Image (cartoon, rainbow, N blue to C red):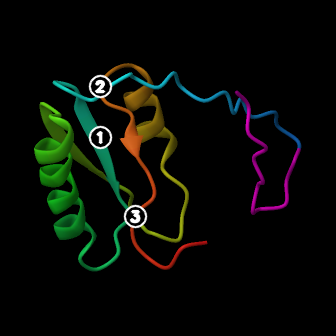
Amino acid sequence: MREKLLDPTGTTERAVDTTLAPRPRNLAGLTAGLLENGKPNAAALLTETGRELRARYGIGDFKLFRKSYFGHPVEESLIQRRARGGPPPVVRVGGPPG
């Protein structure tokens, strides 16, 4: 499944692969990656989210990853490290829906 990706910088020169990763049938025993956006209380909220994922869905563990600043995209080095292995991060936490 492909989703249309809008680039907020207004540049559309480079192609972006937006193919979604396959979804597991269940989360039991898996490790979840949670991306902290740097906003106040994000780490506390994500830690509690990880605990809730463990209690409700049986995840084995969770790992927090942190962006350098909430107003910037995730650093390419973090994306590449995640692409080489480990849990893909859950990315929608904090702020109003939108």
Give the mark nearer the N terminus: 2 vs 3.
Answer: 2
Residue that carries the numbered disc 2 in the rendered image? 86
- Residue 95's quadrant in the figure? bottom left
Secondary structure of the residue carrying tag 1 is strand
Amino acid on which disc 2 is placed = Gly
Q: How far from the left and from the top, in percent, is residue 33? A: 29, 40
Q: Nearer the viewer, residue 96 or 70?
A: 96
Is 27 part of what is drawn in magenta?
no
Give how far apart the Cα atoms at labels 3 and 1 are.
Answer: 12 Å
Pointer 1 local density, CA inside 10 Å: few below 14, some 14–19, many at least 20: many
Which kind of residue does numbered mark 1 sit on?
Gly
Q: Earlier in the sequence, mark 3 or mark 1?
A: 1
Query: Which mark identifies residue 33?
Result: 1
Q: Is residue 49 above or below residue 64?
A: below
Question: In what element is the residue under mark 3?
Answer: loop
Instruction: Give the residues in magenta.
Output: 1-12
SS of the residue at dot 2?
Answer: loop
Please identify the quarter of the rendering in which residue 46 is found.
bottom left
Q: Are marks 2 and 3 in contact (CB under 8 Å)?
A: no
Query: Residue 62 at x, y = what percent?
Result: 18, 41
In whole angstroms, how far apart are the C-alphas of marks 1 and 2? 8 Å
Answer yes or no: do the residues labelled 1 and 2 have beta carbons within 8 Å? yes
Task: Name the residue at 87% across, 47% down.
Answer: 12
Q: Which quadrant holds residue 26?
A: top left
Determine which of the numbered discs, if any, sits on residue 93 in the image: 3
